[in-house]
Image: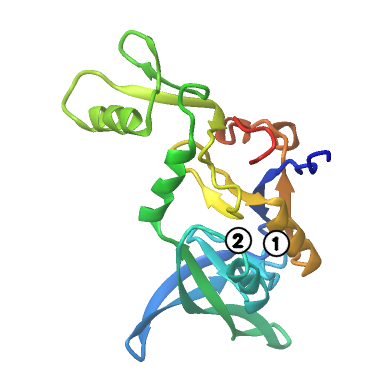
């Protein structure tokens, strides 16, 4: 009997359009809970009430988008209610803030470290450059990189800059994961094909996905390394 065909998994970088963008966030205590009060830009180009709003503070999203995160396997996150304020015309040129219920989804930083265990540093192209003598040093582990970062913060006369051209995920990569980050190695947020399909089926607007570095603007390419998998079939 022939073996079943195993579908190769594909991961994409996840991009949120700034057509709906948060300009400022204040935090207020409401019934003992800290609630983010998010002001959206007062500009027609940036104030759409998208399902996921562009924000530097993790994810401000409505219930429709939140449900996709809930049914997907992601890194652990903290979730609180959020209020989004948008200036809308009352009459004539007079505007008034109107509030909308959203959620603030915050990926817990101490859980991002589990992603570093997935990286095969030997096969990856991750290096440090000694700024004193221009020596190129291959990064052999996450701990190795942390040590060089600590060296930058010390009183040593040495300093290092870093370059990440390619990340290879090893045999212990979790192919069940639908959403993850790899801080210190990429600016990307990575999603599975399952997550992408759920977003598209729910018609979440003004988001994008890229699975080839050529799809990204050249200015951004250095911040998004090539991603490969040691196990080509994703199993």
What is the secondary structure assignment of the residue under circle 2? loop
What is the secondary structure assignment of the residue under circle 1? loop
Q: Which mark is residue 54?
A: 2
Image quadrant for the N terminus? top right
Question: Which residue reaches farthest left?
Answer: 155
Q: Taking 83 as reference, is 148 above or below it? A: above
Query: Between 158 and 44, which is closer to the camera in this rendering?
Result: 158
Q: Taking 150 as reference, is 183 above or below it? A: below
Q: CA distance from mark 2 to mark 1?
A: 8 Å
Q: On the image, numbered disc 1 is attached to which residue?
A: 19
Picture residue at 39% right of the left edge, 23% below the top: 140
Picture residue at 39% right of the left edge, 75% below the top: 27
Picture quarter containing residue 159? top left
Picture quarter containing residue 109? bottom left
* Image x and y of residue 15, in percent: 66, 51
User: Can the viewer see residue 185?
Assistant: yes
Image quadrant for the C terminus? top right
Picture residue at 73% right of the left edge, 86% below the top: 92
Picture quarter containing residue 72? bottom right
Contact, CB < 8 Å: mark 2 with mark 1? yes
User: Can the viewer see residue 227?
Assistant: no
* Image x and y of residue 174, in percent: 55, 47
Marks 2 and 1, the one that precedes in the sequence: 1
Q: Which mark is residue 59?
A: none
């Amino acid at each position: 009997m022939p073996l079943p065909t195993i579908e190769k998994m594909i991961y994409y970088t996840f991009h949120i359009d700034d057509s709906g963008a948060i300009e400022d966030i204040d935090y207020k205590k409401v019934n003992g809970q800290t609630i983010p009060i998010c002001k959206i830009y007062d500009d027609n180009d940036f104030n759409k009430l998208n399902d996921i709003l562009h924000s530097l503070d993790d994810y401000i999203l409505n219930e429709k988008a939140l449900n996709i995160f809930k049914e997907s396997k992601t890194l652990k996150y903290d979730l609180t209610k959020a209020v989004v304020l948008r200036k809308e015309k009352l009459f004539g040129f007079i505007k008034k803030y109107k509030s909308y219920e959203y959620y603030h989804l915050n990926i817990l930083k101490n859980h991002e470290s589990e992603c570093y265990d997935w990286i095969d540093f030997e096969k990856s192209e991750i290096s440090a450059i000694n700024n004193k003598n221009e020596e190129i040093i291959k990064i052999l582990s996450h701990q190795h990189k942390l040590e060089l970062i600590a060296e930058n913060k010390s009183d040593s006369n040495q300093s290092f800059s870093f370059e990440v051209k390619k990340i290879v995920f090893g045999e212990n990569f979790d192919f069940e994961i639908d959403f993850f980050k790899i801080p210190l190695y990429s600016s990307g947020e990575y999603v599975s094909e399952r997550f992408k399909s759920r977003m598209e089926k729910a018609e979440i607007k003004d988001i994008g996905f890229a699975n080839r570095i050529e799809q990204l603007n050249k200015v951004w390419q250095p911040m998004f390394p090539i991603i490969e998998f040691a196990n080509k079939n994703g199993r």
